[in-house]
Image (cartoon, helix red, strand yellow):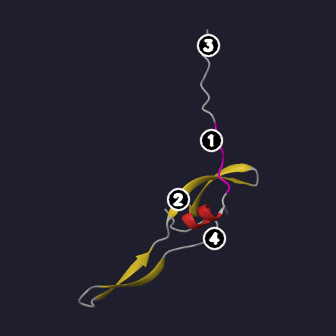
Amino acid sequence: MAKSCDICGKAPTFGRQKSHAHNVSPRRFLPNIQPVKAVVNGTRRKMRACTRCLRSGLVTKAPVRPKTFAKPTT
């Protein structure tokens, strides 16, 4: 799964871990990406959005559709 936001393009960044003994090793900071069903141009679409975009209202969540059941045939 791609760890990037479809709205703002936020992606993993790189940094360093420092231990108490000052040993340094590389690490990745991953964004908090959530799968979301959103309304885009009037249609429902599955996309990945970071929590910052969800909180700030940049994503319009799609309403939950009622489940439809098949009618029994007689």
Residue at image coords 57%, 60%: 48
Spatial separation of the CA atoms under disc 2 and disc 3: 41 Å
Q: What element carries label 4?
A: loop
Residue 1 in the image: x percent, y percent? 49, 62
Q: Is mark 1 on a helix, strand or loop?
A: loop
Choose the circle earlier in sequence order: 4 or 3.
4
Residue of label 4: 8
Residue of label 1: 64
Residue 67 in the image: x percent, y percent? 60, 32
Spatial separation of the CA atoms under disc 4 and disc 1: 25 Å
Q: What stretch is highlighted in magenta?
A: 60-65
Q: Is residue 65 above or below residue 47?
A: above
Choose the circle earlier in sequence order: 1 or 3.
1
Left or right of residue 26: residue 20: left
Choose the circle earlier in sequence order: 2 or 3.
2
Residue of label 3: 73
Local crowd at mark 3 within 10 Å, few (<14), some, or many (≥20)?
A: few
> Can residue 18 be found in the magenta stretch?
no
Is disc 2 in contact with disc 3, using a CB cutoff of under 8 Å?
Answer: no
Choose the circle earlier in sequence order: 2 or 1.
2
| Amino acid tagged 4 | Cys
Choose the circle earlier in sequence order: 2 or 4.
4
Local crowd at mark 2 within 10 Å, few (<14), some, or many (≥20)?
A: some
Spatial separation of the CA atoms under disc 2 and disc 4: 13 Å
Is disc 2 in contact with disc 1, using a CB cutoff of under 8 Å?
Answer: no
